[in-house]
Image: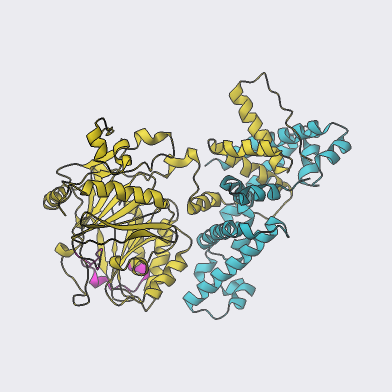
Amino acid sequence: MPDTDETLVERAKKGDNRAFDLLVLRHQQKILRLVTSIIRDQHEAIDVTQEVFIKAYKSLPGFRGDSAFYTWLYRIAVNTAKNAIIAQIKRSNMESIDAILAEPKNLSPKLQDYATPEHELLSDEIAATINKALQSLSEELRVAITLRELEGMSYEDIARAMSCPVGTVRSRIFRARETIDAYLKPLLRE
Amino acid sequence: MPISNPYCGNKYSKIRLDIQQRKYQLSDLVDGVIVADDLTQLLNSLDNDPELRKLWMRYNLIGQIMRKEPLNFRAVDIADKVRNELGFVYNHEQLKLTPKFNLLTSINKSCATVTSRLSALFANIRYAWPNLQSRGAWVGILPALAISIMVWLHTDWYSNNNPHTTGVENLAPVSTEQILPVAYHVPNQESEQASKLDLLVATHHQLQIIDNTEITDYPQFMNISGQAGFSGIALQSKPVLSVNNNLVNRIVPFTKVLPDLAYIQHINSYTPLLRYARSDIADLNLKTPYSVDFTTAIPTDGTGSAKSMLRSLTSNQGISCPVMFGDARSKDNMKSIFWYANNHTHIDPEAMETLNVKQTSSGTPPIKRLLFFDNVTQTSVYLESGTNDNRRGHKQRGTLNIWQEYRSGYKIIAVGTIAKNRLRNVVDSLALQLVDAEP
């Protein structure tokens, strides 16, 4: 099965910024989480995450696809975040980046000020909502979306497992997503 | 294996069918089974349907949650910031970039003198705003909105001999000029057409400065001066029009680009690249009083960025310069920064007095700065009279394009985050208007 990232990267490399936008939307939460684990200041983390994607965009022509896009993005994120920490240290005359990276308690008060409980609460709420939505699905929809999202099975394999045409699998997965989204959307309404 | 789209919802209206099709295509894309044509169709649809982006994010979120991938979900759209930074805007978003301010309520009636000077100065100049608005169907309504020009009149400049200017009278007033759109200027006479060097002037909206413009007085700014780190800070409490669309990602040291515009700095502190700005400031190794203009234009974290920059400046021993923070959003935000400056920096409270914050230039006065703003982006044009040369050309600094040329006795420098050809069009249009003006 073709990789989603691969498909979008290919388009983005041809100059379609909308494809890159979808890549950012797809990975922004994961990268933000990763960066936040290195840089605890949430404003700085958001800025750095943005910078990660800008770097990725500018480096995209050189991305050969030897690794998965996310792996490549992950490396950019870690390097960018570490560089940001180093810059912070230089600014605040702190002693060692290793000490900071190894021991979060050594972070300055500002760096520790990343009050994320509300974010975790929101994440928990999202997870609970999706689980609730999953339970509301008919069995055939739930099995289809679970095999796809959890097991990573291809449509063909799911079709064989569920003894139905591939088109039906596609339809079931879509309907499952649409149903779950109906639960999720109000939660994420701006 | 990509699957052809079997969807045939003939019981739906076409619109609903289209929406459902796009949702199907998004689902296909999540699973990597979308066919090339569908992907093209889907990407095109993103231009006009903001909901599709959100749906895409939610579809991906569903999978991530189901797989129990570690998330610390933030209701923050990094992608939005990235797109702004890269200058990529969807069609449906163009009006969203419009800053919210009310010019009419911000105009102070106390500066009639400056007003009359303004009027006289620009009486012979009509500024044409080339078709920068052509990105969408809203072209026609833009001039009817509060399109505004901020003119930095009465440009003062520092000199090494007089590093500390004093008094309000020496301050560069920030004028907020009320602009009225005039009707389309359609060329209907051959002679008129012939008089136009650039047809853009004739085919696009022209703006004309109204007589008796009222100007916001300087006391509307909160000012303090400090001792440590830099010589002072002025916190601008009114909305300014020097907002741009967040494309400037670095401090722009004109000293390195345009020697004639030394000391004029513009920073957009929206960007995450503040540290580069900081290092650029340090690199400049400032020797003279100096003005830095921070424009924060992001609605959410600009204030934080300004504070961050403030911290950085006050802790940097090598910098001694007046700083002006201009904020495009609200007085409250600037109050917040003001409070922060008082409580978190080493500024002597007793030194709170009118500060010498100026726009500076090493050119020959008067240098007029004109700001053209179309509710999406801005372009600055610097006019210096009484000079002539044959040099002209384009330069680039970061995402800023710069065009400089000499015409009709004026040196014209246009700086903006717009395409260089557009920039040149602005200059061409303006230069045309200067033909009849006295240098």
Q: Is residue B291 above or below residue B191?
A: below
- Quadrant where the N terminus of chain A sits is top right
Q: Which residue does the image show at 36% across and 71% down from the upper left?
A: B345
Instruction: Compare residues B124 and B65 and report the one nearer the observer.
Output: B124
Q: Is residue B266 above or below residue B43?
A: below
Instruction: Compare residues A157 and B316 and report the one nearer the observer.
Output: A157
Is B141 on the left or on the right of B51, as rendered? left
Q: Is residue B143 above or below residue B13?
A: below
Is B35 on the left or on the right of B171, as rendered? right
Query: In the rendering, at what x and y percent does residue B61 appear?
Result: 66, 46
Instruction: Compare residues A186 and B237 and report the one nearer the observer.
Output: B237
Colour approach in the figure: by chain
Q: Quadrant of residue B357?
A: bottom left
For the colour cyan, the matching chain is A
Query: In the rendering, at what x and y percent does residue B22 appear?
Result: 64, 33
Query: In the rendering, at what x and y percent does residue B327 appear?
Result: 34, 55
**What main secondary structure does the magenta stretch of the protein show?**
loop
Query: In the rendering, at what x and y percent does residue B421 appear?
Result: 40, 50
> Is residue B358 within the magenta segment?
yes
Task: Identify the hue of chain B.
Answer: yellow
Q: Which residues are magenta?
A: B342-365
Q: Quadrant of residue B148?
A: top left
Is B424 on the left or on the right of B65, as rendered? left
> Is residue A102 within the magenta segment?
no
Q: Which residue does the image show at 44% across and 40% down from the upper left?
A: B135
Q: Is residue B425 visible?
A: yes
Q: Which residue does the image show at 61% across and 20% down from the upper left?
A: B13
